[in-house]
Image (spheres, helix red, strand yellow):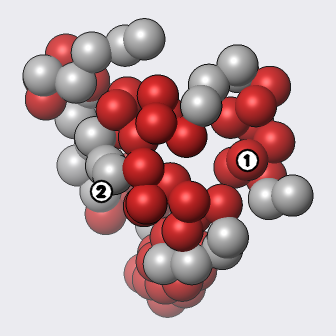
Amino acid sequence: MSKIAQLRQKSGLTQRELAHIVGVTETTIRNYEKGRSILEWIERIIRLCKALDCQPEDLINYVEAEETGINDR
């Protein structure tokens, strides 16, 4: 079981609920849990940070859920 799946279940969320909170489809969550797409992206971010001597926050503009219109559960 993937870390994402473990944490989702620990939080008491279904894949559908997590998808809604994150603002993606349920299929995307399934893919994340199977190790598809997101892990490659994260690995690229980590390599960029090492190359540029920075933190992920320096590369990514994080927007709080309230600002995107995505509601908490």
Q: Which sits earlier in the primary sequence, circle 2 or circle 1?
A: 1
In this rendering, position of residue 56 left or right of residue 46 = left
Which residue lies under the disc numbered 2?
A: 60
Disc 2 element: loop
Task: Tell me where residue 5 appears, x and y as whole percent.
Answer: 73, 47
**Which amino acid type is marked by label 2?**
Ile
Tag 1's secondary structure? helix
> Which quadrant: the N terminus?
bottom right
Residue 65 position in % (x across, y down): 26, 24
**Label 2 crowd bin: few (<14), some (14–19), many (20+), radius 10 Å:** few
Residue 40, position in %: x, y? 54, 83
What's the residue at 66%, 74% (across, down)?
35
Please determine whether, in this image, residue 23 is positioned above or below residue 68.
Answer: below
Decide which of 70, 30 is in the foreground and name it: 30
The number of discs equals 2
The answer to which of 45 and 3 lies nearer the viewer is 3
Res 21 quadrant in image: top left
Q: CA distance from mark 2 to mark 1?
A: 24 Å
Task: Please tell me how crowded label 1 is: few (under 14), some (14-19), or many (20+) other residues with Cα within 10 Å.
Answer: some
Vertical relation: 51 (above or below) 34? below
Q: Amino acid at mark 1?
A: Ala
Query: Which residue sits at x=80%, y=59%?
Result: 2
Front: mark 2 or 1: 1
Question: Mark 1 highlights which residue?
Answer: 5
Q: Is residue 72 left or right of residue 23?
A: right
Q: Is residue 1 visible?
A: yes
